[in-house]
Amino acid sequence: MSVSPVLGFEDKDCENPDEAGGKGAGLAKMTRLGMPVPPGFVVRASVLAGLLDAAGARERVLSYLEGADDGAAESSRAVLPIVQELRLPADFTSAVVAAFDNLSSPVGVAVRSSACAEDSEAASFAGQQETFLNVRGKEEVLTRIKDCWASFFSERALFYRSRKGNLSDLGMAVVVQRQLAPDRSGVMFTIDPVRRRRDQMMIEAVWGLGEAVVSGSATPDHYVVSREGVVKKAQVSVQEVAVRADASGGVRQYTLTAEEGGARVLSDADLAELAKIGRQLETHFGHPLDVEWAYEGGTLYLLQSRPVTA
């Protein structure tokens, strides 16, 4: 590979969604703005297609994908083994291992899919491809990168792409990022997405990792704030569990006491800090955003930003 298969968040090419996918490009742009983004790197989107070419499998994969309009399940069953069996060349493995070692993340890393077509203002591919949390060790990172590629061809992903995307698209980058061990996590919409009001923001928050919301195991606190960060509504939910990184790798649920789970997740000061970040990001990007965030040890980090879809 004459061009490095790996991009750091600080690399200019990483801001290009065609190289880093939607998620990777968003992280790179926030990094350049000086936002608090955990360090990481991106496996270029072109690597997957290049490996399919090297295996002589690109045309076969594209022919299977042509049938996904009518049969996503059948197409997925045909393509997944091809992707899972791709041989990773030595120069690719070396580049990934070097970038991983450079992160020196004591709590593991998050390995996250980043499709080139995701996170536009017309369609969001959120949740269509896989994310793996608290991945430990070089071999597991390489395995999870392949698993992210494979998730681009899951039945669910192909069904969505047949309606919102492009089935012949092979552009799938992968983000590898220092794993946080957050006290609190959530999402912020810099517009009220329900009422479409631009004068207020909506913020949801849980204890631990945001995976608790994704898995449906916890109902988040719900806050509405003005653009200046003044709290207009604070709806506190009793959260029975929190998802946290497990010492052996991966994540697991921890039971919260009624006192712990019933406490308000975000203070007025936290909400004001989030609203300020939201204003700065929206000013820079020029449109309303959906921002994933986390607090670790009292420090705010940004994990993703994408346009609020229509």
Image: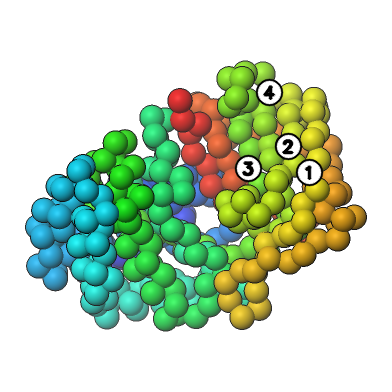
Q: CA distance from mark 1 to mark 4?
A: 21 Å
Label 1 and label 3: CA atoms lie apart by 15 Å
Which is nearer the N-term, disc 1 or disc 2? 2
Residue 172 shows in the view: no
The picture places residue 292, in percent across and down from the top left corner, at: 59, 46
Please, what is the three-letter code of the amino acid marked with disc 2? His
- Residue 58: quadrant of the picture: bottom left
Q: Nearer the viewer, mark 1 or mark 2?
A: 1
Q: Which residue is mark 3?
A: 187
Q: Amino acid at mark 1?
A: Ser
Query: Foreground: 101 or 183?
Result: 183
Q: Residue at x 20, y 62 (%)?
A: 78
- The amino acid pointed to by label 3 is Val
Q: Are marks 1 and 3 in contact (CB under 8 Å)?
A: no
Q: Report the quarter where the C terminus lies.
A: top left
Q: Is residue 202 above or below residue 155?
A: above
- Say which of marks 2 and 3 sits in front: 2
**Relative to 246, is 218 above or below?**
above
Q: Which residue is disc 1 drawn over?
A: 237
Q: Is residue 133 visible?
A: yes
